[in-house]
Image: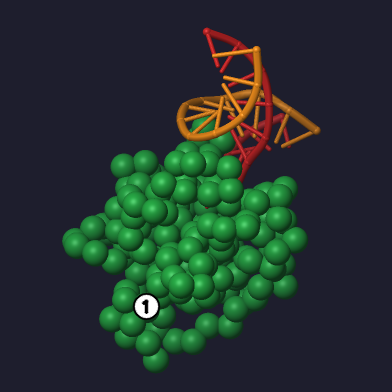
Chain colours: A green, B red, C orange
Amino acid sequence: MKNQCLLEKELFHTDPLTAARELIGTELLCGSCSGIVVETEAYAAAGDEAAHTFTRPSARAFVANNDAGSAYVYLNYGMYWLANVLVKSKSGDGFVLLRALEPRKGIATMRRRRSRKDLRDLCSGPGKLTIAMGINGKDHGKSFVRGHNKLRFRTAESPVEILTTSRIGITKSADLPWRFLKKGSLFVSAQKKGG
DNA sequence: GTTTGGATTACT
DNA sequence: GTAATCCAAACA
């Protein structure tokens, strides 16, 4: 079983696919709130037409100028903050998009922020979970692994069964099986659940 | 300066 | 089905 040291020092120094898969089942801690990661997607910095790095010089600069484990947070559709973790390795750099969480701690706070009471509707989407956890543009560039940031990951308590599907909500490179889900989770995003 | 296209969500 | 709402990038 992995320990916290392994998680922090090695997880984000792998390729995006490995990191996205390994994050399933970990606990994302954000201030007083937390949730189990049940859905992620991998985006590759090279050769992935769906990744920001493919079209945005600013995203390529972010990869060059930040350490593995940094948060890449951006505003999508002018309304929703989406949170990624930067990964860097010899076998490729990229991002892991955090798409859904199973709420654990700070549920009352999440309900207030989301104006929703159903546990399944607090963090079941990339835009929803940032609202519930209080993540926004001010967190862009912060580290998930360094210092005393509000953002941390805790190693999974027990092994998790994982499903793999194609990524959703994109049009380019949409056929790649780069989306990962915790098998049987009721807390994944509402779009096609896969598996 | 203007146009375009989104890694989404909530509501009808 | 579709409105909401803003930014980076591309174009003029």
Above/below status of A143 relative to C2: below
Q: Quadrant of the N terminus of chain A?
A: bottom left
Relative to A190, say whether A161 is above or below.
below
Considering every residue shown, the one lying at the far bottom of the view is A1
Give the side of residue A180 with respect to residue A72, left or right.
right
Task: Name the image quarter holding the C terminus of chain A.
Answer: bottom right
Secondary structure beneath label 1: helix
Front residue (pair A187, A92): A92
Kind of residue at disc 1? Glu
Horizontally, is A41 left or right of A28 in the view?
Answer: right
Q: Position of residue A78 (x, y in %)?
A: 52, 32
Query: Which residue: 32% across, 74% down?
Result: A8
Q: Is residue A76 above or below residue A147?
A: above
> Mark 1, chain letter?
A
Q: Which of the pair A180/A160 is nearer the observer?
A: A180
Residue at coordinates 29% horizontally, 66% vertically from top-left?
A: A145
Q: Residue furthest left?
A: A148
- Residue A178, image x and y in percent? 63, 66
Task: Describe residue A49's horizontal placement relative to residue A117 as left or right.
Answer: right
The answer to whether residue A106 is visible is: no
Question: In percent of the image, x 35 and y 47: which residue is there?
Answer: A140
Residue that numbered label 1 is attached to: A10
Q: Quadrant of the rendered structure where residue A68 is?
A: bottom left
Where in the figure is residue A41, as x and y percent of width and height? 57, 62
User: Residue A84 versus residue A31: which sits nearer the camera?
Assistant: A84
Residue visible at 30% across and 58% down?
A143
Mark 1: few/some/many CA within 10 Å (<14, 14-19, 20+): some
